[in-house]
Image (tube, rainbow, N blue to C red):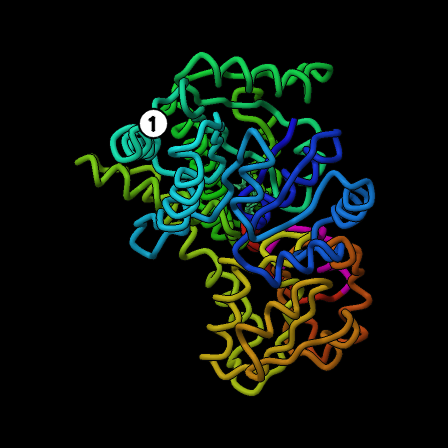
Amino acid sequence: MRIAVFGLGYVGLSTGIVFATKGNQVIGVDIDEERVKKINQGILPFYEPKLNDYLLNVLKRGNFYATSNYEDAVRNTEIGYICVPTPTDNEGNVNLIYLNQAIRRILNLIVGGNKYYTIVIKSTMPPSTMSIIRKIIEGEYGLKIGDDVGLAHVPEFLRTGTTLSDLEAPSRVVIGVEDEKTRELLYKFYKSLYGDKNVPIILTNFVNAEFIKYTSNAFLSTKISFINEIARLAEKLEGADVKVIAKGIGLDPRIGEKFLGAGLGFGGSCLPKDLRGFVKTFENYGEKSYVLAAAYKVNEEQPLRGVKMLKELVGELKGKKIAILGASFKPNTDDIREAVSIEIINELIREGANVFVYDPKALDNLKKVFGEKINYCGNLEEVLRGAHGAIVVTEWEEIRRLKPEKFKELMTQPNLVDGRRIYDPEEFMEKGIRFRAIGLGPR
Ligand code: UGA
């Protein structure tokens, strides 16, 4: 297939590279010329394990290139995936301006010509957005869906840090489609991609596809906030441990063990924004979301609970060296969008602490936010040396591997908050670490 991908952010670029890897001819399109240039030179604009090698490979084989030229892309392909961002403001209003622009750019190239083109939207949108897009296509442009243009919504479920395996074998493919021609085209395409792996394909209408994406992220968010709420009570009761509780409930297949990791809360470019957007969508339709709004609230409060624990261990934070272990919103990425580290660092600055941060990949991005206000360390020894307190914010493998002896040897006072529950409390306490952790009751 000859495919264009509009929007070379995380989802678009990863999707385009994987389509090309599977033998399709792919053109990646982005309005950011600098980004396009770098991609064509084989430089990935973000960190994602192994993806850079894949990019180099498809560039070398000649079945992928990037451009800023929409016309070139539409002329030379028959299907266009729109993967532009749909950011959400603090009130949950979803900004559809980039989506609107991308669709109109493509429609302007199709209208009046005799080219049939299929538009597939991957960007996450509030339920009912597709019906607005349908109105633009049919009402404003006078194009008939199924005759002049194909239209579908195929939401993306890939996770940062494991993008390649998620794209190689997704848990499911959801295709929101309302015309026969596009239904057939996409069903065949996804069968050719994943048929041998028995990946379930759900064919449904536009609104259900939109709902499935938002509901999926909302459920994951709620699961995390649910266990974080349980963690709060566990912290009060002698001997309680949320990790043991999560394991005990997670073995019930109706509940499941995944996404019950209590910690400092969820961040990233998806879960918080989609949850806000969903809560707002309820409001827009005159409904009130109790569960989702509560999940959001729990998550807003969660990072500062880590700072409170630090204060309980260290005392007054003013002038103290505090070590932040990990800053990206999750391991194996340099992404710090809505990362809990940002709120934690802001609070520590307000408290007058001397903040030192180590992260294997995210420091360059963090510098853009905090500049000279904090100190950036090249390794774990440097961040821990002489610290009065440390907090685990992101569970990178090398942070997981740290032994209690290392904290004792390097820190001025071995005060440690395990914000991601990666250490064995008994082991750390036995070795003389003053230890607090999310969801861990007094010992
Ligand atoms: C999330 C979804 O998991 C993907 O399915 C979806 O495609 C994506 O959003 C999206 O909409 O694009 P992602 O944001 O990459 O993926 O990362 P997650 O693995 O979901 O983690 C999000 C946050 O939840 C992280 O901050 C992580 O630390 C936190 N988390 C995760 C917990 O606090 N506890 C857990 O048990 C799991």
Asked if the magenta segment contains residue 405, the reply would be no
- Viewer-nearest residue: 420 or 133: 133
- Viewer-nearest residue: 6 or 363: 6
Q: In which image quadrant can residue 252 be found? A: top right
Q: In which image quadrant can residue 185 be found? A: top right
Q: Is residue 219 left or right of residue 238?
A: left
Q: Which residue is mark 1?
A: 143
* Residue 225 in picture, x, y percent from top left: 45, 44
Circle 1: element type:
loop
> Residue, x 31% and y 42% (percent of image)?
279
Image quadrant holding the N terminus, namely top right
Picture mark count: 1
Q: Is residue 263 above or below residue 385?
A: above
* Residue 418 in picture, x, y percent from top left: 63, 58
Crowding near the residue tagged with mark 1, few <14, some 14–19, many ≥20 C-alpha atoms within 10 Å: many
* Residue 357 in picture, x, y percent from top left: 65, 72
